[in-house]
Amino acid sequence: MTKTKNYNIEILRALSCVLVLAIHVSNYYCRGYGEITDGEFLFSVIIDTFARLSVPCFFMVSGALLLGRDEKLPHHAARIKRFFVILIFWNLVYYFHNIFYMGTEAHLWKLIYEPMEAHLWYLYAMIPIYLVLPFFQIMFRGMNVKLDRAFMALSLAMIFIMYLSTFASEELYFDLPLIGDRSYAVYFVAGYMVQKYRKRIRQPGWMFLMLFLITNMVNIIGTIALSHQTGDFFERLLEYGNPLIFGGSVAFFIWILQMQDGSIALSERTKRFMDVFGPCTLGIYLIHILFLDNYKKYVDVIRLSAWIAIPVVVLGLLLLSYASVYLIRKIPYLRNVV
């Protein structure tokens, strides 16, 4: 029996893909604080803040789709192997890109410790989750409602404590073995929990939308105020460990997942597009920095207004990246690296 595709999930995946491009473009202008006008900075911060839901949603989509499955070890091994191949391939691509095109220093041996390009951190975060996924699947299938709630309560408490500790320039001496010292595994599990208990959520969707809007407005106001106070772009409130980012992102995830009772109606034409676009989202994420680096290399923040640059560059990156990935996926030996 063929499993029906959940297009609420596909919408989240596609939207997250677009918004992660918006983060990287708007953040370029946010970091131009002092060189751009206050209006441009405000616009850039608004886009940057609202787009931050994209990365948490990527993790939550993966958790919603994978954590509840019953998969054999060979299937897990194949997934992990593919991600290792992707990690090595794109580190090599950006190594040569940085050395021969951008003219920046890079050391290939460092890919063990850090990515050749900052955005590849996502692969370094996902691979450990995939390594423990078969054990997580068995563990969570055996947990009841009380244990699920206890796990999320403990995880959220740890996220809050770890985030606050960073403002004191300190790091906790210990971390929870199940979630590590970052919030990514918690987002992964949260996606599964929302999907599992979606029908038990009685609150109307508008309440989750309002929560998403309120948490983001707090972060926008705080970021602008603290940026003016420090004289530089204050990015700390936009970190994924911020409980407000967590709460807002989960609220948005629930809102989309609840649309039309979890089975959103799309036209056949839209479904066909989503079926083609969805598998390209990881590749778009991986490749778009090649094009964005070109923009940054030749266009300084003061040369083109953020009001124009952010929407135009995001659209351009999306079209160029999608076209490139679509063509790459036609090549047999390369389709597995995007």
Image (cartoon, rainbow, N blue to C red):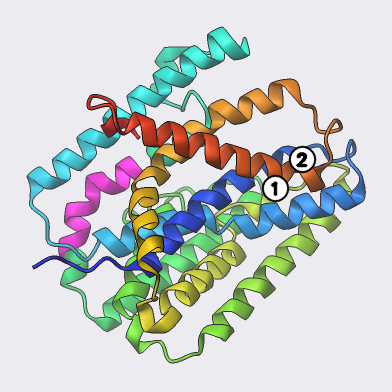
Camera sees residue 141:
yes
Residue 150: quadrant of the picture: bottom left
Residue 197: quadrant of the picture: bottom left
Residue for point 35% across, 88% down: 200
Q: Is residue 126 left or right of residue 203?
A: left
Residue 153 in the image, given as x and y percentages of width and height: 42, 74
Q: Residues within 10 Å of mark 2 (few under 14, many from 20)?
A: many
The magenta span reads: 126-138
Q: Which residue is mark 2?
A: 29
Q: Residues within 10 Å of mark 1 (few under 14, many from 20)?
A: some
Residue 316 in the image, given as x and y percentages of width and height: 61, 38
Q: Is residue 221 left or right of residue 211?
A: right
Q: Which residue type does callout 2 highlight?
A: Tyr
Residue 333 in the image, given as x and y percentages of width and height: 23, 24
> The residue tagged with tag 1: helix, strand or loop?
helix
Q: CA distance from mark 2 to mark 1?
A: 12 Å
Query: Image quadrant for the C terminus?
Result: top left
Residue 329 in the image, given as x and y percentages of width and height: 31, 34
Residue 303: quadrant of the picture: top right
Q: Which residue type does callout 1 highlight?
A: Pro
Residue for point 75% across, 53% down: 45
Q: Which residue is mark 1?
A: 311
Camera sees residue 104:
no
> The residue tagged with tag 2: helix, strand or loop?
helix
Q: Which one is in front in this view, the residue at disc 2 or the one at disc 1?
A: 1
Above or below for 331 versus 63: above
